[in-house]
Amino acid sequence: EVVMTQSPATLSVSPGGRATLSCRASQSVNNNLAWYQQKPGQAPRLLIYGASTRATGIPARFSGSGSGTEFTLSIISLQSEDFAVYYCQQYNDWLRTFGQGTKVEVK
Amino acid sequence: QVQLVESGGGVVQPGRYLRLSCAASGFTFSNYAMHWVRQAPGKGLEWVAVISYDGSHRYYAGSAEGRFTISRDNSKNTLYLQMNILGINDTAMYYCARGAVVVDGTPHWHGLDVWGQGTTVTVSS
């Protein structure tokens, strides 16, 4: 099983600021990585797949990068609706493991 | 409108069983792999199981292997999760989600792009 580790657990950012979230895989997942956003009481929403491709309707302030074992989700000009929990998920292996999540909170 | 609607959750005693359903609409269900993902109260997302578009392949997380069975009925556009020997650690919100689309026999993964609203399973004596 591929273990996904996200850091930090919590990130405090001012509105209008920039957030950089990290996700590390225990073995290479190539670029088979997705990012999701989840707000309280809601189902997750797909943001990024293929490590860097934005899903339909996702604003350009969200960007993903990386390959192999190291991945980054960047959010610039943070809006109020961006404060949420973010998860990475690998799909290189049939067991599609998630990271434990990073909470982006208001500083 | 593309939609997934889960049902079948509830309160169940430890050691008992439950079957969840996920009704799909607004897309060609039989072209997509489907997944179950769960989230314990206050915890992160845990991938549970996947079934291929035609039901020929199924994979499970270790926590589900041997106790849970994922299945689908493409004639009814419905996904299922049979959960047996439930334990307290199975208490969670269970989501179904759409996965890879098959085009000309080749799967294309674009993430879990459609999610249901979830159904709550509580295992308690």
Image: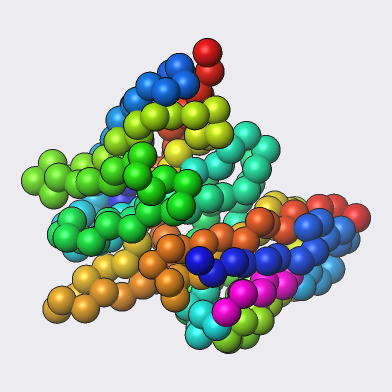
Q: Is residue A85 left or right of residue B70?
A: right
Q: Residue at left 39%, top 29%? A: B85
Q: Residue at left 27%, top 40%? A: B80
Answer whether residue A91 is magenta in the image.
no
Quadrant where the C terminus of chain A lies?
Answer: bottom right
Image: B60 above or below A63: above
Answer whether residue A26 is magenta in the image.
yes
Start-end of magenta stretch: A21-27
- Classified by dominant secondary structure, the portion drawn in magenta counts as strand
Q: Residue furthest left?
A: B75
**Considering depth in this image, is A19 or B54 the residue closer to the camera?**
B54
Please provide percent x and percent y for residue A3. Answer: 59, 66
Quarter where residue B50 is shown: bottom left
Q: Is residue B118 left or right of residue B23?
A: right
Please provide percent x and percent y for residue B35. Answer: 36, 53
Please provide percent x and percent y for residue B91. Answer: 53, 30
Residue A58 at least partly seen: no
Quarter where residue A58 is shown: bottom right
Please provide percent x and percent y for residue B28. Answer: 18, 57
Residue B27 at least partly seen: yes
Q: Is residue A9 left or right of residue A93?
A: right
